[in-house]
Amino acid sequence: MIIVLGIAALTMLIGWPSMQRTIQKNEERQFWQTFRQAWQAAQVRSKTSN
């Protein structure tokens, strides 16, 4: 049982940095999507209000 717990803990420790990078990539992708939408909305507002 201790061996299984050790293997599980080791697997989680090895996978943690990879999971963090994935989370960071998703957050960056979401930021740029939000930024793009806000930019396009500002362009539309500027065209309609001169």
Image (cartoon, rainbow, N blue to C red):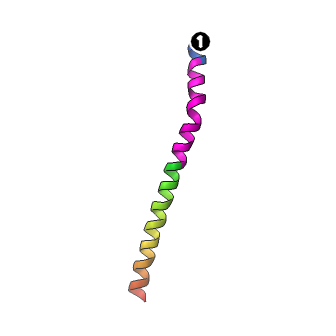
Amino acid at pointer 1: Ile
Kindly identify which residue carries mark 1: 3
Vertically, is 50 above or below 16?
A: below
Asked which secondary structure carries label 1, the reply is: helix
User: Is residue 20 shown in magenta?
Assistant: yes
- Please state which of residues 3 and 18 is positioned toward the viewer in this rendering: 18
Q: Is residue 49 left or right of residue 20?
A: left
Q: Is residue 40 left or right of residue 21?
A: left
Write the residue at 40% across / 84% down: 47
Vertically, is 12 above or below 35?
A: above
Q: Residues within 10 Å of mark 1 (few under 14, many from 20)?
A: few
Q: Position of residue 34 (x, y in %)?
A: 47, 63
Q: Quadrant of residue 15?
A: top right
Write the residue at 42% across / 87% down: 49
Q: Quadrant of the C terminus?
A: bottom left
Q: Quadrant of residue 46?
A: bottom left
Pick out the residue farthest to the top: 1
Q: Which residues are magenta?
A: 7-24
Vertically, is 27 above or below 10?
A: below
Write the residue at 49% across / 61% down: 32
- Per the picture, the main secondary structure of the magenta-coloured stretch is helix
Q: Quadrant of the N terminus?
A: top right
Vertically, is 36 above or below 18?
A: below
Count of numbered tags: 1
Q: Is residue 43 left or right of residue 8?
A: left
User: Is residue 8 shown in magenta?
Assistant: yes
Q: Position of residue 16 (x, y in %)?
A: 58, 34
Q: Position of residue 8 (x, y in %)?
A: 56, 21
Q: Position of residue 27 (x, y in %)?
A: 52, 52
Write the residue at 47% across / 56% down: 30
